[in-house]
Amino acid sequence: MDRNHLQHQVTCMRKSLFDQGYLDEQFIQLEELQDDANPNFVQEIVTLFYTDSARLIQNIEQALNSSPIDFSKLDDYMHQFKGSSSSIGAKKVTDECKVFREYCRAENAEGCIRTFQQVKQEYAILRRKLEVYFQMVRQADVAHTA
Amino acid sequence: MVLGKGASSSLSRKMVDGVENMVSNCNDFTVLVVDDDPVIRKLHDMHLKKFGLRAQVVENGKKAVDLCHFGTIFNLILMDKEMPIMDGVEATKELRAMGVNSLIVGVTSRDSQYETQTFMEAGLDFCFEKPLTADKISFILQELNKKN
């Protein structure tokens, strides 16, 4: 596959991530920080997000499974997850986190459990899309330098 | 949104255009990033590097207070509000009580706006929504240059 075609695919996929609301302008901030001295900054920070998210998702699941539910602790965990999501521009994930926090403040366990499934779903979808996107970016980079 | 003692409510293009001059003056400034979120720590560290600044990073307010207590001096402290062990409000109060006169800039999440005033009253110079952007850091460095 020639490099122009690969680059075109990368551009189209990137555009679709924004058009479909998976990413917002904060992701552009990450891209603007990437340079020749830090060529993998975006992927590094997204990978860091995955690692931290795994920890927070586990904490939230444990908190939801405890009886009685400590809504204050649950809100703290989700606040952290929302913060991280927002920092990489993960718009749909962040939006679901906000909905979760509303249920948390209302101490609505059922709402929290239901919304957490949405949070995890949006996180999984974004993660898959970004993995495909970064793989295409790497292929385009290899083709560019060949 | 910016809150601060005497802060302008808008970031003018003039401030951003003055960045290059600021960078040449900034290399000696010491910065401390205090945040429990590793993504934010890395993000803010990279933003600061772009302005020629090297930052120390810690994950809670107690570590920030301990560093200053044992004599480390920072020109600028970026302080998250909600952290375990010691939050940003408590850490800022302790730092000011110790006589630390660094520029302390608070960073909060959007839905904590109602608590921002409490954070400011703890002794912040400015408070921004997180994450910081190049424009916000540019503004902070302008203020840091004035202070120093």
Image (cartoon, rainbow, N blue to C red):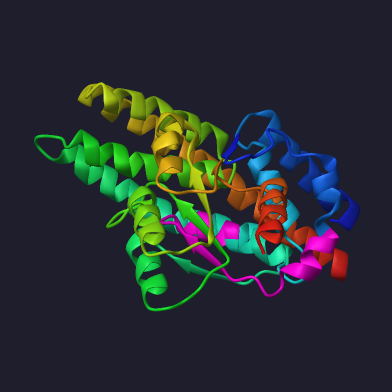
Residue B78 locus on image (x, y percent): 52, 56
Residue toward you, B15 or B83: B15
Q: Is residue B109 above or below residue B49?
A: above
Picture coordinates of residue A106, whole percent (x, y): 25, 21
Based on the picture, tell me whether residue B41 belongs to the magenta stretch: yes
Asked if one can make out residue B71 in the rendered structure from this viewpoint, the answer is yes
Left or right side of B98 for B72:
right
Q: Is residue A56 left or right of residue B3?
A: left
Q: Position of residue A40 (x, y in %)?
A: 67, 65
Q: Is residue B36 above or below residue B32?
A: above
Q: Is residue A76 left or right of residue B31?
A: left
- Looking at the image, how many numbered discs can be counted on the residues? 0
- Give the magenta range: B20-44
In the picture, measured across the screen, residue B76 lies left or right of residue B10, that is left
**In x, y percent, where is residue B136?**
67, 47
Seen at 80% across and 39% down, the residue is B12
In the image, A94 versus B34, the foreground residue is B34
Q: Name which quarter of the figure residue A91 lies in.
A: top right
Q: Toward which corner of the image does residue A118 lie, by quadrant?
A: top left
Is B104 within the magenta? no
Q: Residue at x 71, y 60 (%)?
A: B145
Name which residue lies at 32% across and 63% down.
B62
Q: In the rendered view of the protein, which quadrant contains the N terminus of chain B?
A: top right
- Front residue of B121/A64: it is B121
Is residue B79 or residue B50 the one in the foreground?
Answer: B79
Instruction: Write the residue at 45% across / 51% down.
Output: B80
The residue furthest bottom is: B71
Quadrant of the drawing holding the C terminus of chain B: bottom right
**Residue A36 visible to an observer of this rendering:** no
